[in-house]
Image (cartoon, rainbow, N blue to C red):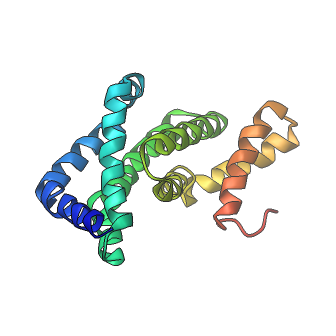
């Protein structure tokens, strides 16, 4: 057990030195933001295993660190926080662009599809504890206050007009909103 702790500490301090870790994470994040890079990564099992192993090594060092707080702090500072910050910017820009280009029913449909895609992607690549944060960041930017009113108004119209084909996507978005407590009462 002592040998494992020493090995993990050496891995964290010597192999994953802050400069090297930052470079690795920057390369990973750039690939995460590019849809073509994602598809290429998912289609190449060897590259996917390398990416998963690197991220898992950062996570495992954190989980198994002799000093639990420092390990978690290392993972959060090295990987999770930069990932979430990069995703915030990416999602904000993408949501804004989609809102300008699409009608609200089309936007809802795209958001539901993208949420599913992002959930699958993050489940493959990052540790489970981070996937919840990714989903929260996604919902924050794609179903934010400025678009929530439009989405809810459109949902009411869908129901009133009995547009059954659109109901499923609306209810998926509504469920996500309610799970986050962003909507107290529906009129």
In the shown orientation, is residue 78 left or right of residue 41? left
Placement of 168 over or under 136, stated as above or below: above
Which quadrant, please, contains the N terminus? bottom left
Give percent across and percent down for residue 143. Answer: 57, 53
Give percent across and percent down for residue 42. Answer: 42, 28
In the shown orientation, is residue 21 left or right of residue 79? left
Viewer-proximal residue among 3 and 7? 3
Give percent across and percent down for residue 80. Answer: 36, 58
Res 139 visible = yes
Q: Residue at x 28, y 70 (%)?
A: 2
In the shown orientation, is residue 150 left or right of residue 85? right
Image quadrant of residue 4? bottom left
Viewer-proximal residue among 22 and 96? 22
In the shown orientation, is residue 150 left or right of residue 139? right
Q: Residue at x 57, y 60 (%)?
A: 145
Q: Residue at x 87, y 43 (%)?
A: 160
Which quadrant, please, contains the C terminus? bottom right
Image quadrant of residue 43? top left
Res 34 visible = no
Q: Residue at x 54, y 39 (%)?
A: 120
């Amino acid at each position: 057990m002592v040998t494992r702790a020493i090995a993990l500490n050496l891995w964290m301090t010597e192999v994953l030195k802050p400069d090297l870790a930052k470079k690795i994470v920057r390369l990973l994040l750039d690939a995460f933001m590019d849809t073509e890079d994602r598809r290429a990564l998912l289609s190449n099992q060897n590259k996917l295993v390398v990416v998963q192993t690197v991220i898992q090594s950062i996570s495992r060092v954190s989980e198994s660190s002799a000093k639990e707080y420092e390990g978690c702090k290392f993972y959060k500072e090295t990987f999770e926080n930069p990932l979430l910050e990069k995703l915030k910017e990416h999602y904000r820009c993408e949501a804004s662009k989609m809102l300008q280009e699409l009608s609200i029913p089309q936007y809802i449909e795209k958001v539901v599809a993208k949420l599913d895609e992002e959930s699958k992607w993050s489940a493959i690549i990052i540790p489970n504890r981070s996937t919840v944060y990714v989903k929260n960041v996604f919902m924050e930017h794609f179903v934010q206050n400025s678009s929530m009113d439009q989405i809810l108004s459109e949902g009411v119209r869908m129901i009133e007009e009995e547009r059954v084909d659109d109901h499923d996507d609306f209810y998926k978005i509504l469920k996500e909103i309610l799970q986050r407590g962003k909507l107290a009462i529906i009129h």
